[in-house]
Image: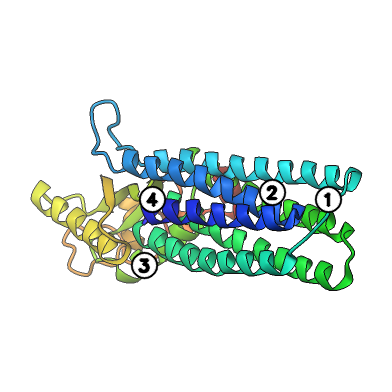
């Protein structure tokens, strides 16, 4: 998919460049400059996907998936840079105005690129989400933001065409330079979050809710749950409390059941590190196992697994089964 994104970006860049030479409009130049970023970012994204697809080795035991985050970071930085260049060109146009010409032909050419960009961007985002590819999603979002800015530029060109107010050319450029910079910031922010292993709270909530609904009787408690993204690969590690008397084969079967359950719902591109803990006396009041021959305390109530208590680094007890919002804030600053 990324090869098509690069090829189309190159073609659309030359189309927009032709529209700029026809019109001499700074607003059209704005669009062409952003397409330049599309071309550069496309090649970077293509290379990052090649690197990310490499198998793990001794130097990279978790694989090369984070290359996609680096690619998205570069793309975000380039988008911001393009926005700053556009601001410069718009200011220079205020000082030294250009004569705008052949706006009708320029509008047709730019409109064509907007339609193509949106379609390719939508496909890229869909493929990126399906395959867990940060690079494809970043490319798709960039292409769609390019579409929205192009539509705004077309509207501005139409107004200029009818009103003959050429000063609007630079004003339109400044407005969409701000939009482009804002888009670049979000791409950069997402990529840095991936590089820094920032917790994906939405994904964590989905996984925990699914496990809570489908938990087995022997799964007494789940805690210290973590999810790390390596490009399209998820790495999950957690502690699973099981009845202390299970042998190794039985405990391993429970782990297999846990991993199979997660893979069934969230895909095969997941690796696991599951640490098993033996249940303690204080686990009895929350243990739902009815045929337990070594139970020392009567069952009192089941602890529902939530994000708050599953991320906690301690075994669940009836009186301390939940983690407060304050503790969640300490574990993940800035997250709710």
* C-alpha separation, residue under disc 3 versus residue under disc 1: 60 Å
User: Is residue 16 shown above or below 44?
Assistant: below
Q: Earlier in the sequence, mark 4 or mark 3?
A: 3
> How packed is label 3: few (under 14 Cα within 10 Å), some, or many (20 or more)?
some
> Residue at left 24%, top 56%?
259
* Residue 206, disc: none
Q: How is the image coloured?
A: rainbow
- 3 or 2: mark nearer the eye: 2
> How packed is label 1: few (under 14 Cα within 10 Å), some, or many (20 or more)?
some
| Residue labelled with disc 3 | 210
Q: Earlier in the sequence, mark 1 or mark 4?
A: 1
| Residue labelled with disc 4 | 223
Left or right of 221 on screen, residue 319: right
Residue 42 visible (yes or no): yes
| Residue labelled with disc 1 | 98
| Residue labelled with disc 2 | 181
User: Is residue 268 shown above or below 214?
Assistant: above
List x then y, in percent, for residue 300: 38, 67
List x then y, in percent, for residue 69: 46, 42
* C-alpha separation, residue under disc 4 versus residue under disc 3: 15 Å
Left or right of 306 on screen, residue 150: right
> Residue at left 25%, top 57%?
268
Q: Earlier in the sequence, mark 2 or mark 1?
A: 1
């Amino acid at each position: 998919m990324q090869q098509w994104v690069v090829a189309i970006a190159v073609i659309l860049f030359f189309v927009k460049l032709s529209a700029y030479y026809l019109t001499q409009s700074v607003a059209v130049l704005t669009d062409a400059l952003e397409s330049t970023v599309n071309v550069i970012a496309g090649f970077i994204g293509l290379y990052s996907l090649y690197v990310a697809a490499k198998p793990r080795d001794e130097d990279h035991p978790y694989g090369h998936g984070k290359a996609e985050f680096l690619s998205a970071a570069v793309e975000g930085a380039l988008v911001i840079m393009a926005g700053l260049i556009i601001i410069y060109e718009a200011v220079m146009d205020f000082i030294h105005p250009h004569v705008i010409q052949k706006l009708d032909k320029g509008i047709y050419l730019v409109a064509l690129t907007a339609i193509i960009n949106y379609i390719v961007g939508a496909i890229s985002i869909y493929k990126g989400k399906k395959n867990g590819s940060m690079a494809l999603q970043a490319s798709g979002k960039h292409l769609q933001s390019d579409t929205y800015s192009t539509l705004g530029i077309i509207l501005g060109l139409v107004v200029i065409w009818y009103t003959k107010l050429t000063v609007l050319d630079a004003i339109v450029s400044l407005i969409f330079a701000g939009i482009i910079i804002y888009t670049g910031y979000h791409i950069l922010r997402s990529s840095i979050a991936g590089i820094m292993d920032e917790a994906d709270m939405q994904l964590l909530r989905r996984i925990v809710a699914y496990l809570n609904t489908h938990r087995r009787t022997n799964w007494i408690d789940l805690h210290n749950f973590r999810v790390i993204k390596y490009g399209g690969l998820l790495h999950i590690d957690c502690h699973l409390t099981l009845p202390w008397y299970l042998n190794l084969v039985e405990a391993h079967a429970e782990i297999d059941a846990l991993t199979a359950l997660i893979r069934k719902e969230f895909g095969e591109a997941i690796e696991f590190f599951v640490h098993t803990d033996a249940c303690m006396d204080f686990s009895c009041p929350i243990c739902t196992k009815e045929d337990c021959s070594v139970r020392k305390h009567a069952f009192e109530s089941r602890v529902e697994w939530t994000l708050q208590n599953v991320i906690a680094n301690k075994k669940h007890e009836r009186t301390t089964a939940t983690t407060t919002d304050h503790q969640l804030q300490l574990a993940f600053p800035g997250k709710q």
